[in-house]
Image (cartoon, grey):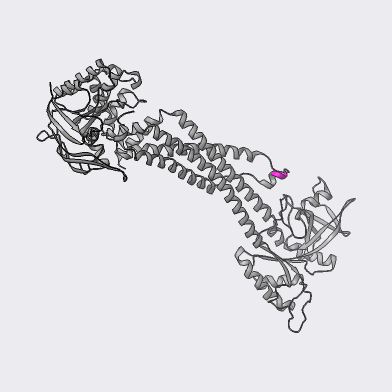
């Protein structure tokens, strides 16, 4: 393409575009519609994905939860079927021997424990654990409160962190922080209340409905420190398999079981679930994407169809132009340009409409609305934009290319003579 | 004229074969034709004689299967695509029976079209279009669309368009075929006038009135030239 070619193609394009405003408008509208469809589908998919991921990860990510069980292999003269019950100090041992872990903690649990505030008593679960639990399990305090800290453990303080729903049951609208709650008739000071979160997976009950106290205090109060669960968190998901093998190598000799015995602990490896969830979501997004792309391609086919009709209608005009010395690319150029401009303008309008819709939907409050909380907010992202641009561009090129090829194949000699 | 020293059209043993795979038609069976600058040649012959094919070849809308064709001294028989398009733009002006004006644009824009293809700058284009429209007597109809013009006027616009790039030959295919006697007379008058001004004209026609105005009549039959000479009175 020389400069002359480009100038001519543009001139010819504008001369012909001027003559068919209605057709251009309708074509652009159909493409805008297709763009809105694909963008909204993808935006809903993305919103759903983010929402599901955040629900899923409300429990924390990269975790493995281990329930102590029985040995399934004999070890150093000990028979199989021996119960293995790690204690809180075994967790310290794991931390010391496995510095590669992001965190490790033990949880000791008291089910259906009486918590009393004033005249009100609620039976709930009380967990004894250590400060890392708060961050890693995404139990963040509401403003004005805090989670457990190392001093609480050190000094066996009688402090209590409440799940938000439990707090509401006990205190109603009152601010619990600083108040005293009796656990099995021992007074505890409430130091914080968990921020509301939407949690889709749990072990041992939703975080909103339990209370957390220092593990040292738990031991003193309930007189036991055998773990209900041991939890480890790795820094990267791919480190989990090795970490679980290594954990048995560390704990086996200490607790007296074969490190090869993988059935001592019941393991919930959340990394597996994360992977599966990611696959399902990817599938979902692909599905939405394909539907959207098909819609958009229908729009593109529509444009191609119209362009074909235009080519046919202008066969004679094309012949005349060729007789007057138009090169083939001066004929095909405006057609391709027309297809591209239609898709570009249509895509732009569609994108604008989608952005407006998504923004408006984002303004609807989702708090307390189960459907919206599950669906999440439709979200437009750069990859979605890029994918749409790619599909639109392809559609536009095809919509212009095929009719243009047809136009180029016109034999001027045969079109010029009689009607 | 760029090739004043030689013939404008020099065809040597031109053959044209249409081969669709199943059917093989030899439309032109060896044409030798030489047209000097300033000649007015009428090509006559019955339908199917090959005169349309001959016109397509002369106008570089098509290329011969065999033989050589020199247009204004330039061998065009082997050219294709863009080169032929450029030749048509610079060297040939077409006038058709059905005018073939582009219906959606004005007379002015129709005449301007070849200048656009030829890369003539805007100011010169304007001057040239106005000059040509004046020459064909339609200076006051420049902003009319073809549908707003009479047949005779349309053909005069078409002639103005054909002359836009100042071509070596003016090639007309039944230019009076769709016109009434009076308009046809006007167009014939315009052709004569152009001839007298030194233009080279090749006209394909059934119209013996028009053919008689030409200085030379070439009769084509069955793909061959069977008669070539002075117009019979």
Q: Which residues are magenta?
A: A365-371
Report x, y in % for residue A55: 68, 52
The reply to whether residue A44 is visible in this rendering is yes
Report x, y in % for residue A385: 52, 45
In this rendering, position of residue B75 left or right of residue B111: left
> Quadrant location of residue A57?
bottom right
In this rendering, position of residue B122 left or right of residue A94: left
The reply to whether residue B166 is visible in this rendering is no
Residue A49 versus residue A18: which sits nearer the camera?
A18
Which of the image's four quarters has the N terminus of chain B? top left
Report x, y in % for residue A161: 77, 56
Report x, y in % for residue B3: 13, 35
Q: Residue at the spot x=48%, y=34% of the render?
A: A27
Q: Residue at the spot x=40%, y=42% of the render?
A: A401
Residue A370: within the magenta? yes
> Quadrant location of residue A280?
bottom right
Q: Is residue A102 above or below residue B80?
A: below
In this rendering, position of residue A14 left or right of residue A54: left
Q: Is residue A188 above or below residue A334?
A: below
Q: Residue furthest right?
A: A119
């Amino acid at each position: 393409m020389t400069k002359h070619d480009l100038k001519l193609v543009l001139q010819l394009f504008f001369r012909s575009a001027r003559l068919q405003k209605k057709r251009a408008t309708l074509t652009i509208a159909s493409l805008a519609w297709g763009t809105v469809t694909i963008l909204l589908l993808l935006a809903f998919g993305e919103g759903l994905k983010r929402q599901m991921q955040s629900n899923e990860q409300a429990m924390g990510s990269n975790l493995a939860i281990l329930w102590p069980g029985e040995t399934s292999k004999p070890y150093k003269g000990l028979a199989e079927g021996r119960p293995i019950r790690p204690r809180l100090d075994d967790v310290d041992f794991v931390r010391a021997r496995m510095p590669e872990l992001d965190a490790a903690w033990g949880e000791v649990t008291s089910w259906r424990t009486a918590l009393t505030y004033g005249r009100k008593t609620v039976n709930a679960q009380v967990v004894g654990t250590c400060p890392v639990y708060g961050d890693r399990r995404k139990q963040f305090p509401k403003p004005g409160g805090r989670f457990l800290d190392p001093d609480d453990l050190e000094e066996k303080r009688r402090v209590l962190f409440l799940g938000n729903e439990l707090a509401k049951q006990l205190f109603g609208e009152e601010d619990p922080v600083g108040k005293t709650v009796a656990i099995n008739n021992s007074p505890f000071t409430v130091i914080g209340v968990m921020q509301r979160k939407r949690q889709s997976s749990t072990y041992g009950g939703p975080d909103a409905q339990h209370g957390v106290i220092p593990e040292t205090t738990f031991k003193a109060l309930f007189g036991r420190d055998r773990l209900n669960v041991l939890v480890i968190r790795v820094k990267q998901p791919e480190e989990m398999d090795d970490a679980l093998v290594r954990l048995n190598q560390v704990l086996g000799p200490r607790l007296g079981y074969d490190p090869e015995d993988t059935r001592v602990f019941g393991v919930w490896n959340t990394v597996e679930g994360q992977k599966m969830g990611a696959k399902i979501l990817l599938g979902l997004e692909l599905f939405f994407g394909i539907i959207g792309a098909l819609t958009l391609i229908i729009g593109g086919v529509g444009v191609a169809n119209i362009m074909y009709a235009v080519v046919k209608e202008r066969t004679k005009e094309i012949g005349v132009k060729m007789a007057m010395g138009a090169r083939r690319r001066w004929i095909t150029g405006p057609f391709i340009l027309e297809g591209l401009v239609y898709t570009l303008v249509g895509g732009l309008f569609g994108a604008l409409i989608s952005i407006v819709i998504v923004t408006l939907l984002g303004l609807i409050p989702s708090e307390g609305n189960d459907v919206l909380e599950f669906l999440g907010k439709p979200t437009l992202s750069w990859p979605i934009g890029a994918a749409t641009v790619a599909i639109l561009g392809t559609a536009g090129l095809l919509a212009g290319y095929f009719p243009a090829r047809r136009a180029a194949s016109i034999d001027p000699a045969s079109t010029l003579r009689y009607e | 004229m760029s090739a004043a020293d030689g013939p404008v059209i020099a065809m040597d043993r031109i053959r044209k074969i249409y081969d669709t795979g199943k059917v093989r038609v030899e439309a032109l069976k060896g044409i030798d034709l030489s047209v000097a600058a300033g000649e007015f040649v009428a090509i006559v012959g019955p339908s199917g004689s090959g005169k349309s094919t001959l016109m397509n070849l002369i106008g570089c809308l098509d290329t011969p299967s065999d033989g050589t064709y020199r247009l204004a001294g330039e061998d065009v028989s082997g050219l294709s695509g863009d080169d032929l398009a450029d030749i048509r733009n610079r060297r040939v002006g077409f006038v058709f029976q059905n005018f073939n004006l582009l219906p959606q644009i004005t007379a002015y824009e129709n005449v301007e079209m070849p200048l656009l293809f030829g890369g003539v700058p805007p100011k010169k284009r304007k001057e040239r279009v106005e000059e040509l429209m004046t020459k064909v007597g339609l200076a006051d109809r420049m902003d009319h669309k073809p549908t707003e013009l009479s047949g005779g006027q349309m053909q005069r616009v078409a002639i103005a368009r054909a002359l836009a790039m100042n071509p070596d030959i003016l090639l007309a295919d039944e230019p009076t075929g769709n016109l009434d006697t009076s308009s046809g007379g006007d167009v014939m008058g315009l052709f004569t006038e152009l001839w007298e001004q030194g233009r080279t004209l090749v006209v394909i026609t059934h119209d013996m009135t028009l053919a008689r105005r030409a200085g030379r009549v070439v009769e084509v039959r069955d793909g061959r030239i069977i008669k070539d000479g002075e117009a019979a009175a």
